[in-house]
Image (cartoon, rainbow, N blue to C red):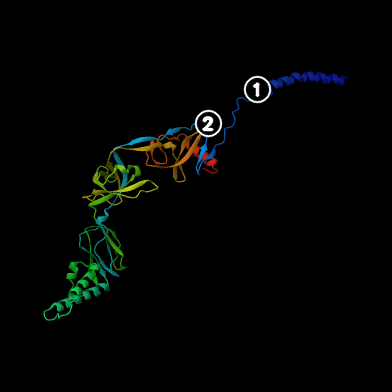
Amino acid sequence: MRHRQRMSALRWLLIPLAAAVCGLSACDSNPSSHADVAPPLPVPRLVRQSGDGAVLQLSGEQIPGMTTAEVTQIELPGVLETNGHVDFDDKRVATISSRVAGRIDNVRVSQWDNVRRGEPILSLYSPDFMTAEAEYLQAQTTAQVSSAPGLGGGGLNLGPAMLAAAKRKLELLGMSDADIAAIRSPTPTVWMRAPIGGTIVDNKAVRGAAVNPGDELFTVGTLDQVWIVASIYEDDLSRVNLGQPLEAVTTAYPDLAFKGFISRISPDVNPDTHTLEIRCQVENTDGKLKPQMLARVSIVTRPGEALSVPMEALVFDTNDYYVYVDVGGGRYERRKVQIGAWKDEGPVRVLSGVSAGERVVAGESIQVNALWHEANGESS
């Protein structure tokens, strides 16, 4: 009996304590206890479209700070500028090659020497010269005998034809008319002469070296007129024409403008860069321009237009540039784009991949790219 009374008293003491604890913890009776807990955001996923394409289904709340920007058409200035390098005019370059098997006996010039047209620059020893000269002298004697009065007979006179053939053989071996006229006796050594006046830009001839037919010995080039080879973008092609005047400035002579004009326009477009080459003919009477010098070319032309996107919209991934185009409904299409050169800040010129008026992800584009790889089961 006494035990039941003690238990009843204990129950009455515990009821207020339990009420106090429940009040402190709010138990589960407050319906607003879960109102501040946000539901989980949907996981980004790839939505397959017709064909092989896919778009990223993405909510703006999933990437705080994500913004989009419009692909705009910008106006290009009336001066088209591009980079290039100085090169030889291929019509003003000549290669001296051996036409016989033999040995180099003597060399009179070195690389970068200036030579005159017809100047002897190398002596070549070859038995082929001696044989051809002997044949020429024999044909010369035969022609003289056959043409003498009373010795020609009534038959066909082949002397002049034999002489012409023997002379032609010497010409094919590289001998000039003056060298042929000076032949008095067969000799195995012949001097090779410069075919044009200019500068020795390449010298592969070494005294005592053996040579074979076709071996290149010297390259002679003239620098009074040179080419500057430069590249322009495909969408600038309509702004340039043959004969269009231009100015070029080099890093070596930044205060000196070299004048010229467009001489050649390449018929081929590089599919990787969407550029094509132009060759600019430039006067170089003082010889300041040297092959492989870098040059900045300015071509006065009509203004043009080009597409542009903010620099932060570009994502460089696996050697290519991409943008994420907003196609509506929280979906973003990943597109590869070709770009032109950009400055350190401002918009970037886009050559292909997007159209004017489309919107691309600008802010947090790198995070969008990471989510695209994650949704695709790849590592970014």
Quadrant the N terminus occupies: top right
> Label for residue 345?
none
In the rendering, at what x and y percent does residue 85 appear? 31, 49
In the rendering, at what x and y percent does residue 270 appear? 37, 48
Residue 355 seen in this snapshot: yes
In three-dimensional space, the C-alpha distance between marks 1 and 2, rounded to whole angstroms, equals 27 Å
Q: Is residue 65 left or right of residue 259?
A: right
Residue at (64%, 24%) from the top-left corner?
33
Residue at (71%, 20%) from the top-left corner?
20
Element assignment for label 1: helix
Write down the residue under mark 1.
31
**Nearer-the-camera pick, 87 or 234:** 234
Mark 1 or mark 2, which has the lower sequence index? 1
**Nearer-the-camera pick, 311 or 325:** 325
Q: Is residue 211 left or right of residue 150?
A: right
**Label 1–label 2 contact, CB within 8 A:** no
**Residue 307 vertical placement versus 284 (above, below):** above
**Nearer-the-camera pick, 48 or 163:** 48
In the rendering, at what x and y percent does residue 263 appear? 26, 49
In the rendering, at what x and y percent does residue 208 appear? 29, 68
The amino acid type, in three-letter code, at marker 1 is Pro
The local crowd at label 1, few if under 14, some if 14 to 19, many if 20 or more residues have their Cα within 10 Å, is few
Quadrant assignment, res 129: bottom left
**Residue 298 vertical placement versus 227 (above, below):** above
Q: Is residue 34 left or right of residue 337?
A: right
Write down the residue under mark 2.
61
Quadrant assignment, res 337: top left
The amino acid type, in three-letter code, at marker 2 is Glu
Element assignment for label 2: helix
Specify the farthest residue to the left: 149
